[in-house]
Image (cartoon, rainbow, N blue to C red):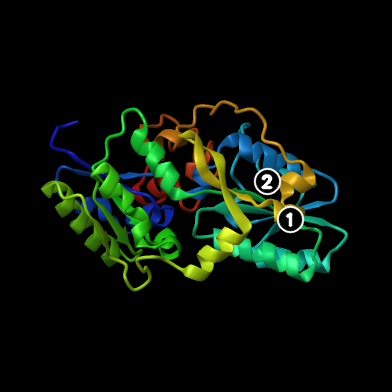
Amino acid sequence: MPCSELRLMEVCGTHTMAIARAGLKSLLPEGVKLLSGPGCPVCVTPPEVMDAVLELAMRPGVVTATYGDLVRVPGSRRGDSLARRRALGARLLVVYSPMDAVDWAAEHPESEVVFLGAGFETTAPGTAAAILDAAERGVPNFSVFSMLKRVEPALRALIASEGFNVQGFLCPGHVASITGAESFRFLPEEYGLPAVVAGFEPGDILSALRRLIELARSGAAALENRYERAVSPHGNALALAAMERVFEPRRDIWRGLGEIEASGLGIRPQFAAHDAERRLGVEIPPAAGSGGCRCGDVITGRSEPRDCPMFGGACTPEDPLGPCMVSSEGACAAAYKYEGV
């Protein structure tokens, strides 16, 4: 790698897909490389957590409610997904909102409805609201298996990891709309890395990238918000209050980064009746091998999708080896769909 190469990282799966769809990497100046970070919640979920989900889905009386993005994500065994388990008899409910799962549980008291709460701070408030709604309405057969994660601890772990080589971050507008632009202040102040919060239209992303390149090239460690129409300095107070009421930080596992302290969101003990881990005794099995999938390297900037020998051959969207190829926000899926094999 030339010493003059500038390496930047986006930390949002929606950015990853939008950048690929609009072909924005082709517009970057010479010597600037844009990498994908741990910004796809499905992609950062490790296979052993998916194995726990698959075991849960097969339990008698359980209905697994989930966003569509998780249906085809494999566990530690290739091809073993919620879609396969549904074919084997598991009851699967694909929802647009966790509130849909609460309503379904209220209408079907004979079933144990478990919502798979995947996502970052963006989706955490909605999941918290569903738990509060179920508690207030007295829906005892609704619970959440929390796979929710916090972005800041993951970025800190990434920066501290061996071989880290990124000179600036394009920060996720969705997360910042909840946590506030100031939640990324630690990047310039503690690590000397420029950071720019960006929206999702091509013009938003290009404007933010241009400013990020200017900051990085000038050596300016600063935070700028280029998505002011949706992101305030300190975020959404109501959403943050709901998260605080229902969740508490806990140690969690990330694909490509391992276990990170305070990087997950566990359900507080007072809501144990709606916590699937406590209520149903869900346990995470020991970590399994990756089967050759390099998704963990891709989402930590260690490699790009085409560096994986499986890309476009043994691993395609129709037969994915890992989540980066199957998720609608995955870097491999974006590269395959919009940049060609």
Q: Residues within 10 Å of mark 1 (few under 14, many from 20)?
A: many
Q: Could you tell me which residue is drawn at 30 percent across and 48 percent down?
A: 187
Q: Could you tell me which residue is drawn at 50 percent across and 44 percent down?
A: 43
Residue 79 appears in view: no
The one nearer the camera, 205 or 224, is 224
Q: Position of residue 41 (x, y in %)?
A: 51, 49
Q: Which mark is residue 274?
A: 1
Residue 295 appears in view: yes
Q: Which mark is residue 57?
A: none
Left or right, 152 with reference to 25: right
Q: Quadrant of residue 162?
A: top left
Tell me the element at label 1: helix
Q: Which mark is residue 82?
A: 2
Pick the quarter of the image with the N terminus. Answer: top left
Q: Position of residue 285 (x, y in %)?
A: 67, 31
Amino acid carrying label 1: it is: His
Is 251 placed above or below 64 here?
above
Q: Residues within 10 Å of mark 2 (few under 14, many from 20)?
A: many
Is 298 placed above or below 69 here?
above
Q: Quadrant of residue 38?
A: top left
Asked whether the beta carbons under mark 2 and mark 1 sit within 8 Å of each other, the answer is no
**Gap in angstroms between the C-alphas marked 2 and 1:** 22 Å
Tell me the element at label 2: helix
Q: Position of residue 125 (x, y in %)?
A: 56, 63
Pick the quarter of the image with the C terminus. Answer: top left
The one nearer the camera, 184 or 299, is 184
Q: Which circle's residue, 2 or 1, is located before the other in the chain?
A: 2
Q: From the image, state whether disc 2 or disc 1 is nearer to you.
A: 1
Q: Position of residue 158 (x, y in %)?
A: 38, 37
The one nearer the camera, 57 or 172, is 172
Amino acid carrying label 2: it is: Leu
